Image (cartoon, rainbow, N blue to C red):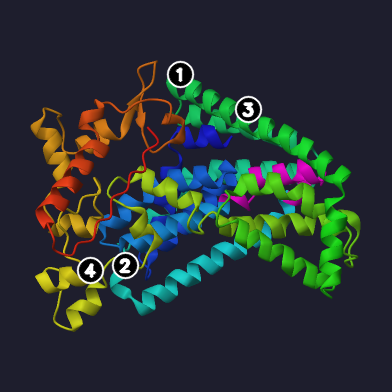
Amino acid sequence: MGVFITQSGIADDLYETANKWLGHLKGGLAISTIAACGGMAAISGSSLATAATMTKVAIPAMRRYNYNDSISAATVAAGGTLGILIPPSIALIIYGLLAEADIGKLFMAGIVPGILTIIVYMIAIWVVSLLRPEWVPRGERTSWRERFRTLHQIWSMVALFMLIMGGIFFGVFTAAEGGGIGAGGALIIAIFRKRMSLKIFISSLQETGRTTAMVFTVGFGAIMLNQFVIISGAPEQVLEAITSFGFGPWGGIVVILFCYLILGMFIGGPAMIFLTVPIFVPLVQSLDLPMTPSELLIWWGILVVTVVEISLITPPIGMNLFIIASMIPDLSLRTIYKGIIPDRVGLERVGKPVTTPEGRLHGQGHIEPFDRDDGIHTAELQKKAPPPQYNAWLNSLGYEGDNPWHDYANSVETPEGEIISGWNMRSAPYPARLPAEHSETAYFTNRAKDFIEETGDQPWLLHLSFIKPH
């Protein structure tokens, strides 16, 4: 269902509708993005799909209104996390299968926390608009007639969501059957709205096949791990360790959640669910909490997924952050992580705007760069710096385009002739679209040698890093 909706471009309608109703408020475009992410989450079931789709739709729109890049990226990254909580969440399905919990009840339990999360995100954006109004300008105010006109774009998706959730809640069909009904309904909606072609249909089936194969393969490994954990007695040992420290049942819950927060800094969300549920669910069941076994599984599932939601935007991993950075070439992870870009307003107040040599030096951390080039400068740096030298060098060698770094050095060609981004880990087996001597590694290694030779005996600092798997 989510793939059909995503591939057919219907997500654009969600954003347009939200923007017509909320865009004129303080921080309205960011608030609209959160609302659209909530709608997208309700039909995709995936945080990564929500973040990827809304990156293409929302960030260009926010840039047109001069939104701060960090706020724009943070909004989409946070909104993307809703996909892991709001049903039909893939994460809840995985948890339900591993913990043998009722998936339908998990879906019902995820609705209220999902809505509360949306409200909290919107309040946070409103607070930012009060503190930094220049970061989140207002959008255009539209007439009531125009607002109501946009509702027809989303009524079919709302009806489909209500049909699935209502059917599961009232026991008309199971969660698995609801997924099939949702997929068929999404396909019909896309066809009637002329958003479905044979190419999109085939691409949707391929993406569904890849996702399903991934889930079942990792799930098979997780079931094996589950059996090993039970045989090894690991939950009992962990319980004894918690008891020895004098923690009660609720103290044990806090300790486990703290472990999730630490793991979330280094492990992606789905992997964390697969790896930890076999260990922690038996442990939680042993803590003698005042709930029935079935209630405990539902309550703990929502709590786990909520904590895993945080991991999706927690550096240094933060999968949603990498998704956004890979889809917006001039938006670096540094900008998304927020805080390293110069405080333009603060520098202007002390008479040193970033357009002056002194202001730019402040933004560079008081290090005068010899050759500052990351291939895709941040938007702020790109406006006041010369074009990336590596791009200019590639152009001089005959590579065409405004950004040959992206088109050749950071892209690969599959055996089937498909050109795909080098940021994707599935691209790792393939070489870049240029010879090794023209790669970033060769170019910047030579520039580093030049730098060392030209500096001679003078003090110097060199930061040289290579990150491309190919």
Looking at the image, tell me whether mark 3 or mark 4 is earlier in sequence order. Answer: 3
Magenta-highlighted residues: 83-106
Question: Which residue lies under the disc numbered 2?
Answer: 138
Q: Position of residue 73 (x, y in %)?
A: 39, 57
Of badges 2 and 4, nearer the viewer stands: 4
The residue sitting at 58% across, 63% down in the picture is 117
Amino acid at pointer 4: Gly
Residue found at the very far bottom of the displayed protein: 350
User: 196 or 248: which is nearer to us?
Assistant: 248
Q: Quadrant of the N terminus?
A: top right
Question: Which residue lies under the disc numbered 3?
Answer: 213
Give the main secondary structure, helix, strand or loop, of the magenta stretch. Answer: helix
Few, some or many C-alpha atoms within 10 Å of disc 1 (few <14, some 14-19, many ≥20)?
A: few
Q: Please identify the quarter of the rendering in which residue 285 is found.
A: bottom right
The residue sitting at 24% across, 45% down in the picture is 375
Of badges 3 and 2, nearer the viewer stands: 3
Measured in 3D between alpha carbons, the distance from the residue under mark 1 to the one under mark 2, in whole angstroms, is 40 Å
Question: Which residue lies under the disc numbered 1?
Answer: 198
Amino acid at pointer 3: Ala
Measured in 3D between alpha carbons, the distance from the residue under mark 1 to the one under mark 4, in whole angstroms, is 50 Å
Measured in 3D between alpha carbons, the distance from the residue under mark 3 to the one under mark 2, in whole angstroms, is 44 Å
Few, some or many C-alpha atoms within 10 Å of disc 3 (few <14, some 14-19, many ≥20)?
A: few
